[in-house]
Image (tube, helix red, strand yellow):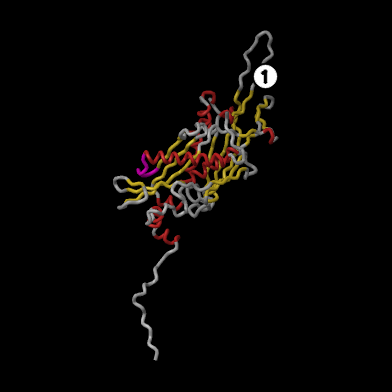
Amino acid sequence: MAASKTPDSTTSPPSLSFPRATFAKLSPHPFFLAHLQPSNPDTPIQRPNGRQPSQFRAPKKHTGSLTHASGSAVVRAGDTAAVCGVRAEVLLASDVGSFGSIGDDDSEVRALGLLVPNVELSTGCSPAHLPGQPPSPLAQTLATRLQNLLYTANLISADELRITYTPPAMDDKDEPSEPPKEETKAWWVLYIDVLFISLDGNPFDAAWSSILAALTDTKLPRAYWDPDRTCILCDDAIANAKTLRMEKLPVASTFAVYSTQQEGPGKGKEDGSGLKKWILADPDTFEEGLCKESLTVVVDCSSAEPGAPARIVTLEKQGGVAVGVAEMKQVAKVAAERWAIWKRVLEETGSLTFRS
């Protein structure tokens, strides 16, 4: 009779393991920290999405996507994609009161509200934004931030939007008169609509980039004042349309800050209280849910000399005190590198035009 085999007591039971997605949902912070602080000090830091801390998602753009818009563009960065359409309408000077006392070009664009952005998120772009829902607080916040940046950065000069008329000189030999002065009869108002078709974090950078790409694609028809009809007429010929020229090229770069209180050395930057922090460029949705601090820096290097530091247009910071002066300098440096990348992307089709 054969002897029965007894189970080997030295055999270890099978280990219990979870897929990455399950681990990230059950314990998001330990899962995230395992990537930012690997056990092997020689292992480079790699975020769960496979990017380095200062690495942005590669941008892609396609202009002229909307045939009935004055200008349009689709911009994608990873799984975040936005489409922007620019619609130009005429604002008559007779409909504006006391426009002669507005002041310089910058205040004229702001006072008349010639740039009107709008953001639409209720498109099913993410599980948090279902179709048919009213405008979310995020959409309203994004529209306000975009409008403030459009005016703060002085992106479009009022001279690009004016429709002027110079009256003919009076033929009076007895009483010579002064040469006729140019009159502003109307302005172009640009309605800038941004619609998200996919959202995986960092919506502000995607929205602003789509606006820049759409504005470089914008063409305004030749408009002129008809003194006989006392109205503005537009030329239908596309060959006579003018390309909208921008004053500057401000590029936005958003960073999220992940910090944790731990003992022992780590790969993050550490202060005296043991707080370790990692500054992550272009955060996705998963990272935004874990990071309590973020900052957006808008830089413009279009008028800077080679090797000169980037000009910071705006700097927004939300939550936390982990980022100091040293980190701000590093963030500005990374943002300047990001500006150069976006400049090359916008120049691919040769549509990027600046006012001289």
Q: Which residue lies furthest to the front in this view?
A: 42
Which stretch did the figure color magenta? Answer: 318-324
Q: Residue furthest top?
A: 174
Residue at image coords 44%, 39%: 332
Q: Position of residue 305 (x, y in %)?
A: 50, 31
Main SS, magenta region, reads loop
Q: Is 302 on the left or on the right of 230, as rendered? A: left
Q: Which three-letter amino acid code belongs to the residue tagged 1?
A: Pro
Q: Can residue 133 be seen in this view?
A: yes
Residue at image coords 53%, 53%: 124
Q: Where is residue 275 in the image (x, y as percent from the top left)?
A: 32, 48
| The magenta stretch spans residue 307 | no
Q: Is 275 on the left or on the right of 342, as rendered? A: left
Could you classify mark 1 by the number of other residues whose Cα lies within 10 Å: few (under 14), some (14-19), or many (20 or more)?
A: few
Q: Can residue 148 be seen in this view?
A: no
Quarter-wise, where is residue 74 in the image?
top right
Q: Is 41 on the left or on the right of 222, as rendered? A: left
Q: Nearer the viewer, residue 51 or 68?
A: 51
| Quadrant occupied by the N terminus | bottom left
The vertical placement of 64 against 154, above or below, is below
Q: Mark 1 points at which residue?
A: 168
Q: Position of residue 309 (x, y in %)?
A: 45, 34
Q: Where is residue 181 in the image (x, y as percent from the top left)?
A: 61, 19
**Figure label count:** 1
Q: Nearer the viewer, residue 67 or 189?
A: 67
| Quadrant occupied by the C terminus | top right
Give the SS element for disc 1: loop
Q: Which residue lies furthest to the bottom in this view?
A: 1
Q: Which of 191 and 306 is in front in this view?
A: 306
Residue at image coords 43%, 50%: 288
Residue at image coords 66%, 28%: 224
